[in-house]
Image (cartoon, rainbow, N blue to C red):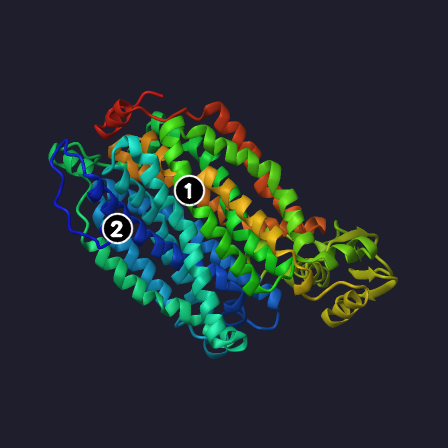
Amino acid sequence: MNSSPVHLPPLAENQELSRTEERQIVLASTLGTLFEWYDFFIYGSLAVFMSAIIFPPDNPMVSLLGALAALAVGFVIRPLGGAIFGYLGDRFGRKYMFLVTVVMMGASTVLLGCLPSYSAAGNLSWILLLVLRVIQGLAVGGEYGGAVVYISEHCSPKRRGLLTSWLQSTCMLGLLACTVVIVLCRTAIGPDAFKAWGWRVPFLASIVLLSISVYIRARLHESPVFSRMKSQGRLSKNPLREALSQWSNLKLILIALFSINAGTVASFYTGQFYVVIFLQQAVAVDQSLVYNLLSIAFLIGVPTYVFLGWLSDRIGRKWIMIAGIFLTALTFRPMFESLISAGNPALVEATIAKPVTLHASTNSEDCSFSLGAALLSSHPDNKKACVKAKQYLVQHGVNFTYVPPVNGLPVAMSVNGQTISGFDAKAYGAALQSAGYPEKADPARINRTKILLILIAMTVIAAMTYASLAAYLVELFPARIRYTAISFPYHIGAGIFGGLLPFIATYLTLSVGDVLAGLWYPIGLSVICGIVGTIFLPSGPRTSAATSAADANTPTAQ
């Protein structure tokens, strides 16, 4: 296989690509998408470092929530990006949207590395951060639908699952590349320097990826399906209206959203992204070890995507995805529970032997914590002593149970026979340490093999839901509105359901006092999506004739 991108001539009508040309199209498309996912995930991985520089430094937990809120902005804005670029892609072509989205993503990522600190620019620092995250979210919103459609409209329908699975794996490969770059930078610069300024280096390095991506995308030709529709005058005049106003199309969008798309979010974002935060904060495992284990798990898990894409071309796509969604609901809580016992057994021992109680009234105004407080770092709830106490305990992986208030105080903590009135971080830390609660996981007691096996299992389950998703969505919608129609369920699922995952999980954990309570969100979502998909989702795979009919802009049989 020639790995260098080649400028291929446009296809004539009914002409099929050779296997070599097919591989070159996949390579060119997936490399650009890989770089965009790297740019998008690098922020989430470095949010804990940025929060101390970009946001007010007086409350670390609130600053972290602010950084995570900026992460959510990038996710939530994605459906708008999908609508804008989907409309433009269905009206004017797939290729040009590739170039626009990669430039938007690459440029905004480089600028993230140039943001001024809060001490230098005040509130302007985090305002600029939000603006750049909006640009990134719009770019990713336009990227996925275009890449999926571009590959699918070039390849043979019999190989669509296999070839688009390479594109699906770029999300994980982007996470892997992000992880490797962070580990290398942190090792070369040193932990202290990386925390102070070195976190900017992975952002600035994106200028190299941007140059490569633009070069690759500029050499691609237009999709043959789009070219034929354009030459025959069959392009949609308003793909957005056609996708949303015709019930036959809107029904499929809604079914896809509330089954495989939201279900994929529950599996992929929990098992590949939320788990990173969980291992570092709740389990208190060293960041370098977390990244190393994740890198190994990702390398082992990536071939699973290609295998499952290939398998979906032969036995159908629906039931592979549905099985992955139900496995998420059944296995994720016990697997996360096992991560705690494998990563920090001393924490489990202390929790059992000397449990923590919080003297507070969950119904009182002094202790109330709203979802808005999880989304906005400046929310008044985050200033309450009771809320600060809950945030401190959860951030250190400490479970607690609520008991009635003492002496009319809004909050007090008891552990090992000692009661501390109000909230004092130093006093809480000293009391927990004396009770045997470890500040960090003991490296000598970490079961690395067990953690790695759990991460691999999560990767395989995520691949079941995600590997054949692109091929399935392409075959669900007619070509004239395909870019637009795919973007809606995918980015609403990923942007809304996925973007809110850290905050809903935080809200549930603080409300219950259990570090595993946040998992009820992805578990509940998986159950609902699995049921909806089982009942309403059309089966597959599509036949070559049915797929060709969709490409020819005629309704496909369900």
Q: Is residue 389 visible?
A: yes
**Where residue 32 sits in the image (x, y, percent)?**
30, 54
- Nearer to us of marks 2 and 1 is 1
Amino acid at the residue labelled 1: Tyr
**Where residue 224 sits in the image (x, y, percent)?**
18, 38
Q: Residue at x 58, y 47 (%)?
A: 454
- Residue density around tag 1, few if under 14, some if 14–19, many if 20 or more, within 10 Å: many
Q: Earlier in the sequence, mark 2 or mark 1?
A: 2
Residue at the extreme top of the image, as rendered? 557
> Which residue occupies the foreground of this view, 221 or 18?
18
Above or below: residue 12 compared with residue 131: above
Secondary structure found at label 1: helix
Secondary structure found at label 2: helix
> Which residue occupies the foreground of this view, 315 or 9?
315
Amino acid at the residue labelled 2: Ala
Q: Quadrant of the C terminus?
A: top left
Side (left or right) of 113 relative to 513: left
Q: Which mark is residue 11?
A: none
Above or below: residue 41 compared with residue 156: below
> Which residue occupies the foreground of this view, 68 or 173?
173
**Where residue 460 sits in the image (x, y, percent)?**
50, 42
Q: Which mark is residue 305?
A: 1
**Where residue 229 sits in the image (x, y, percent)?**
16, 34
Q: Residue at x 42, y 37 (%)?
A: 308
Side (left or right) of 388 relative to 246: right
> Which residue occupies the foreground of this view, 199 or 388?
199
- Residue density around tag 2, few if under 14, some if 14–19, many if 20 or more, within 10 Å: many
Q: Which mark is residue 28?
A: 2
Q: Residue at x 64, y 61 (%)?
A: 284
Q: Is residue 500 visible?
A: no
